[in-house]
Amino acid sequence: MKASNLHDAWASPDNTRLTPKQFSFRLPIHVAAKIAALCEMYPQKSRTQIIADLLTSALDELEQNLPEAIGHPLPPEEEHHERFVAEHLGEAYEPLFYLGGPRGTFRSLANKHFFELEGELGNEKPEPLFKDQYVTEQQFKK
């Protein structure tokens, strides 16, 4: 969610699932004042919803801007499938690698914690928060 979309999100109903555990933390006074202002501007939204949306927006932007690198190569069985698809489409096959670097690490760790939290809610086989992202060496030679 982009910060520019928060106004529209706060004007509509919220169906967000919450974690079973509560997070508690102290905020700098200037941040608390800004959150209080937003709560007053959008009384139909709870403070939790507003803070969650702000964090979502910031985390989405952070994830998009983390440095990327080439990660581990695909396992042989996945590489074979990708090579077959490329050849079937008449395209040259370039070896694929998992996304690495801080962005790849963040996405992997976020999935790990997402699975743990979903498990606490009784969902034993959730879809991952982030799908695997593949890159080629060519993408990093620019």
Image: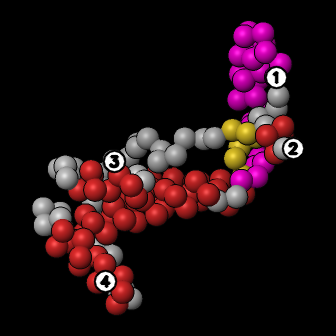
Residue 17 in percent (x, y) is at 26, 54
The numbered mark at residue 93 is 1
Q: Are marks 3 and 4 in contact (CB under 8 Å)?
A: no
Left or right of 27 in this view: 136: right
Q: Nearer the viewer, residue 53 or 71?
A: 53
Range of magenta residues? 68-93
Name the amino acid type tagged 3. Answer: Asn
Residue drawn 78% across the image and 48% down it: 70
Q: Are marks 2 and 4 in contact (CB under 8 Å)?
A: no
Q: Secondary structure at mark 4?
A: helix
What is the C-alpha distance between the residues marked 3 and 4?
34 Å
Left or right of 106 in this view: 52: left
Depth-wise, is mark 3 or mark 4 nearer the camera? 4
Residue for badge 3: 123
Residue 42 in percent (x, y) is at 18, 65
Left or right of 76 in this view: 41: left
Residue 40 in percent (x, y) is at 16, 73
Mark 2 Cα-neighbour bin, 10 Å: few <14, some 14–19, many ≥20 = few
Residue 66 visible, this orientation: yes
Q: Secondary structure at mark 1?
A: loop
**Res. 23 image quadrant:** bottom left
What is the C-alpha distance between the residues marked 4 and 1?
53 Å
Residue for badge 4: 32
Residue for badge 2: 141
